[in-house]
Image (tube, grey):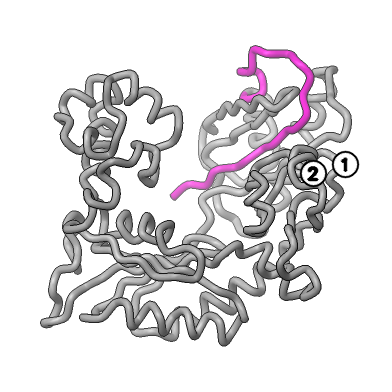
Amino acid sequence: MPPAGRGSARLKGVAYWVLHVDLDQFIAAVEVLRHPELRGRPVVVGGDGDPAKRGVVATASYEARAHGVHSGLPMRTALRRCPDAVFLPVDRAAYEAASATIMAALREFDAVVEVMGWDEAFLGVETDDPEQVARQIQERVRTVSQLDCTVGIGENKLQAKLATGYGKPAGLFRLTHGSWFGVLGGQPTDALWGIGRKTAAKLEALGIGTVGELAATDPRALAAHFGPTTGPWLVQTARGLGPATVDGAPYVARSHGRETTFQRDISDWDAVRAEVVRLAREVAADIAAGQRPVVRVVVKVRYVPFFTQTHGQPLAEPTTAPAPIERAALVALGQFSGRRAVRLLGVRAEFSR
């Protein structure tokens, strides 16, 4: 096994590398394959495909992204930014089928494959020429699916994941301990995997604006601000250190949820409660067959116009029974202090590990 921190150990005389395979604009690309006449046009996939209705963008083609359209953007905003875009409904079955074909192709290689979702996976590979392996992967993916992918190469998962962003679209990029600071040292801290805008803003308030500055920070100093685990982890991440072990165990979802966007805002919170109960029952029905015990229920509320909050409630004991899941959802809903109009509700059940 490679070490958890500094990767690319030599195993049996051969270097160990982590490759991150990321399908380019996956959902939009699948749709373009089904509708070749859309190639080169801005394509937006989301909801039922009607931008006049409420919903959010699932993905956008590169042509649409050039107009500022991205995942999570309200469909109506996407229409304003790119009125010439073609809007299509989400077809989950089609994307799952394409993903299954691609992941099966990745498992043909002499590598450990860790699936991260429909459109990405890590591969642990023993080779002295990771670029050659990456090109073979790209060729195989294109053969079985007609889709393009980008491959990031690193000495650990963190490096490989970030390298992918520098290789897009349909390219390769290698990021190592030796090149880490040359590539990322001057970048803002939210360029790192796992660091979002809020954390970056907190770091900025402490006078830490770049990856290089974060890497030079004493982990103990950040522990005082972010906690004994997160503080040192931030510094380690900025130094390019992370796990190198790729786990080939089958992917198992850690949660399952349902959510709905209302075409008209709900101002009556008795109606909100009724919708949460309905969603909780649907989630319970979804998971009944799998018999995976639920340990926590999370409720998501998106207020008008677009402010989102979540609250969770642990269960007294793991269960798949509908009644405790419903009760936990209502307790979680009771933690919301705001009683403003609601545009979206979601209920998610989290499973025991």
Q: Which residue is drawn at 79% across and 19% down?
A: 341
Q: Residues within 10 Å of mark 2 (few under 14, many from 20)?
A: some
Q: Which residue is drawn at 81% across and 57% down?
A: 86
Which residues fall within the magenta stretch?
332-353
Snapshot quadrant of residue 159? bottom left
Q: Nearer the viewer, residue 37 or 132?
A: 37
Residue 309 picture location, percent across and down:
61, 26
User: Going from the N terminus, do you reach mark 2 or mark 1 first?
Assistant: 1
Q: Is residue 18 above or below residue 322?
A: below
The dot on residue 339 is none
For label 1, the residue is: 52
Task: Describe the element under mark 1 as helix, strand or loop.
Answer: loop
Mark 2 and 1 residues: CB-CB less than 8 Å, in contact? yes
Snapshot quadrant of residue 196? top left
Q: In this view, does 345 lie above or below 96?
A: above
Q: Can residue 281 be seen in this view?
A: no
Give yes or no for residue 345 being in the magenta stretch: yes
Q: Nearer the viewer, residue 75 or 244?
A: 75
CA separation in Å, label 2 and label 1: 8 Å
Q: Residue at x 15, y 77 (%)?
A: 11
The dot on residue 79 is 2
